[in-house]
Structures are given as C-alpha cells and as structure tokens.
Amino acid sequence: MESSEVQAAFKNIQTTYKSNENAIVLLGDSLKILNDIKSQSIDLIFADPPYGIGKDFGISKDIFANANEYLEWCRIWIDSCMRILKPNGTMYFMSSTQFMPILDCYVSEKYFVINRIVWTYDSAGVQPKNKFSSNYEPILMITHNKNSPYIFNKSDILVEAKTGAKRKLIDYRKTPPKPYNSLKIPSNVWHFNRVRYKMIEYENHPTQKPESLLKRIILTSSNKDDIVLDPFAGSFTTCKVALDLGRKTIGIDNNEDFFKIGLRRCGITRDYNNENLEKIKMRKTNNKSKKDHELTLFKGA
C-alpha cells in the first residue's frame, strides 16, 4: 500500500486499516491508535465519543462501571487528542448534558475554550409527560491556549442576519454611503435537523450527526488539504464531509460494521473480505435516547 500524507501522520500503524491518497480508515481502539499518531500532526479534530448511556452499537454497549471511570476515560482521550493537535489546531468535542460541565471544567484548566456551542434540533419520537423535552447537545470548541493562532474562516460560514422585515438600510457613516451588510457570523446556537431515515445521507448508525453540522465545523476551522481526524468516527460523516470539502481525513472506529461504512463513504473500497459494501438502509430501533440516561448509564443500573 502506497504511503500518503495521512499515513505520514502516524509513527506506525498496528491495527487493521485501509487508505487511499486522501483518507485512512482504521479499525481498533481509539486510545491505542491515537498513541501511534505523531505529536502536533493534525489540523482539526471532531470527537463525538460514546456518552456512556447504554446505546447499543451492535457488538457492544457504551456502558462504564461508574461515572468516575467514564470521566477518566474522557480525560485520557481528550489529552491524547490535544497532544497530536497542531499549535494552530482546533478540537470540537461533544458529550452528554450531564457530563459536559465536568469536562468543561477539566479542559478550561488545561487548555483554552474558544466557544461553548449548543446544537439544537427538531423534536421527534416519544415526548416526556412530566418534564420539558431536551432537544440540544453541547459542543466544546477548544485549542491549546489563549495565544494559539487557531484558524477561523469567518467568510466561509456567514449567514443571513435575522432582523425581522428586510429593509434596504443605508449606512451613512461610510463614504460614500453603502447598504448595511446583512451577513453575519453565526452565533453559538446552531440549529441543524437530526438525520432521518428518509434522508439521502442516512446511515445505519444510532447517533449519526448531520452533514450540515460537520460542514460548518470543517469550513470554520480548517483549510484545503488540512488533516481532519475523527477518533470515534461511527457513521464517518466527519470524514465524508472533510473529503467533500477538499481536506484529508483520518477516521477510527472499533466496530467493524462502522469501519465498513467508513471504507465506502471515504471512497476507499466497496468490497471488503468479499462483502459488497453498498448501502442498505435499516431503521434505528431498540435504542434509547441520549437524554434518557438516568437508568441506563452504568453497569447494573
């Protein structure tokens, strides 16, 4: 297998993987594989780890012995990711509403929090009868320290300002007077619909993130030919969108079914061990919401 720029980011590769010129997809434990990546070699990281809530991923459930064990695991992968992030790099990561405040405190002491982002989405499924439904997930955007020259491509992510009735306002402070610019940088509250079964982008994964969410992140915090890493790649949406936008990408997952999704979505191969990898959609069933974690969080619960 020919070497590529993404492979060059590794000290060595000791697990099953397949690659092409712009992408590498690895099957194995993220913590072990992260240790094989060279320090300060990755431009952008997006991490959407298991939330520890009993979500069924086919071959195993993301259940930890207790909250301390889960949080310690999170601290380890966060530090591993920050080790391999370039000095001007950015990491975005997600967690449950229960644990994000704790992880926020941890990274705030060691690194620099650029933004605390709220991803909101449409309501669906069974609604609670005696409390408000929870229709958001938190995202932290961090870099090494407050002086890090992180990338922020504001011109690539401008949105139309919502100012009620549209008027042709003129800014008379300028010479000559010009119309007000109606475009602005988005706020830290992002609304993107969740992925539905009937959508073209739908994959057989219980916690798939929308391409629109990853497109904003990748456009904001990386440039063409940069390396984008997802250590918990799942449906490999991060990798797919990165390639669509002209970036290079590394995706890691320990589930072989998701690994095969990655091979297809990254354009590496449509045949693996004599299996055709064409997409066959299956509805997501028997999976509890990430919000209903009180009774399913840990072993024995």
Image: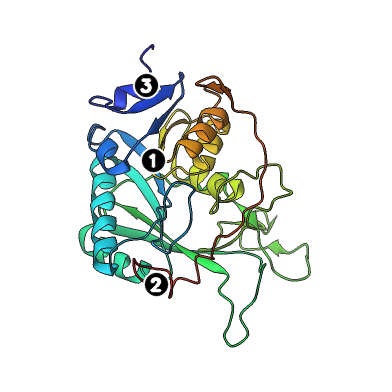
SS of the residue under disc 1: loop
Which residue sits furthest top?
Answer: 2
Amino acid at circle 2: Gln
Q: Which element is circle 2 on?
A: loop
In-image side of 51 versus 84 (left or right)? right
Which mark is first along the chain, 2 or 1? 2
Kindly indicate the quadrant of the structure image that contains residue 253: top left
Above-or-below relation of 145 to 21: below
Residue located 50% across and 37% down the image = 257
86 sits to left or right of 48: left
Q: Are marks 1 and 3 in contact (CB under 8 Å)?
A: no
Residue at the bottom extreme of this rendering: 130
The residue located at (56%, 29%) in the rendering is 264
Q: Position of residue 250 (x, y in %)?
A: 41, 33
Few, some or many C-alpha atoms within 10 Å of disc 2 (few <14, some 14-19, many ≥20)? few
Side (left or right) of 50 relative to 197:
left
Instruction: Say which residue label 3 marks.
Output: 5
The quadrant in which the N terminus is found is top left
Q: Which residue is mark 2?
A: 98
Amino acid at circle 1: Asn
Q: Give above or below for 144 relative to 54.
A: above
Side of 144 where 116 appears, left or right = right
Return the residue at label 1.
254
- Total number of numbered discs in the rendering: 3
Residue 164: x and y, percent?
74, 71
Residue visible at 50% across and 41% down in the picture: 238
Please state which of residues 292 and 171 is positioned toward the viewer in this rendering: 292
